[in-house]
């Protein structure tokens, strides 16, 4: 019986991996572009682990992160433009 469970689990993982890849391709083609970042808890912040793990579900944090990304993209686009079109 354990062998059967092992086979089913192995097959499920194989199908799940293919599903995730297909889902990403469809999402990329139809939706807004997105990136997935894996951020580790910064050194010295171990006592904030619970708060850190809640951040992906915190709407205020996500709004602040989107604003930060907007600023970084604008700043980098400006730098690129200045390099390409020096005045």
Image (cartoon, rainbow, N blue to C red):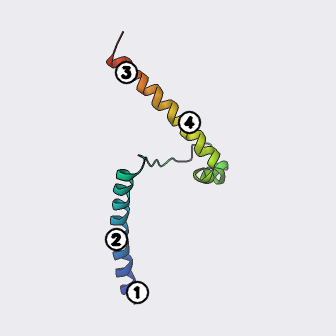
Residue of label 4:
67
Residue at 43 percent across and 22 percent down: it is 78
Give the position of the C terminus as an image quadrant.
top left
Q: Residue at x 40, y 83 (%)?
A: 5
- In percent of width and height, residue 65 lies at 56, 40
Residue position marked by numbered label 3 in the rendering: 81
Specify few, some or many for label 4: CA neighbours under 10 Å numbering under 14, 14-19, or 20 or more.
few
Residue linked to disc 1: 2
Q: Nearer the viewer, mark 3 or mark 1?
A: 3
What's the distance in space between the residues labelled 2 and 3, CA to CA? 44 Å
Q: Residue extending furthest bottom?
A: 1
Mark 4 or mark 2: whose residue is earlier in sequence: 2
Image position of 68 (left or right of 81): right
Which residue occupies the extreme top position in the image? 87
Give the camera-side residue of 8 and 42.
8
Q: Which mark is residue 15?
A: 2
Marks 2 and 1, how far apart at CA:
20 Å
Question: For this view, does 26 lie left or right of residue 41?
Answer: left
- Along the polypeptide, which appears first: circle 2 or circle 1? 1
Q: CA separation, marks 4 and 2? A: 37 Å
């Amino acid at each position: 019986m354990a062998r059967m469970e092992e086979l089913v689990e192995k097959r499920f993982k194989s199908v799940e991996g293919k599903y995730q890849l297909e889902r990403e391709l469809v999402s990329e083609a139809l939706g807004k572009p997105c990136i997935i970042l894996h951020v580790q808890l910064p050194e010295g912040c171990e006592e904030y682990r619970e708060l850190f793990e809640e951040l992906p579900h915190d709407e205020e944090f996500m709004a602040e992160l989107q604003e930060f990304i907007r600023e970084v993209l604008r700043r980098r686009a400006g730098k690129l433009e200045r390099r390409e079109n020096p005045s």
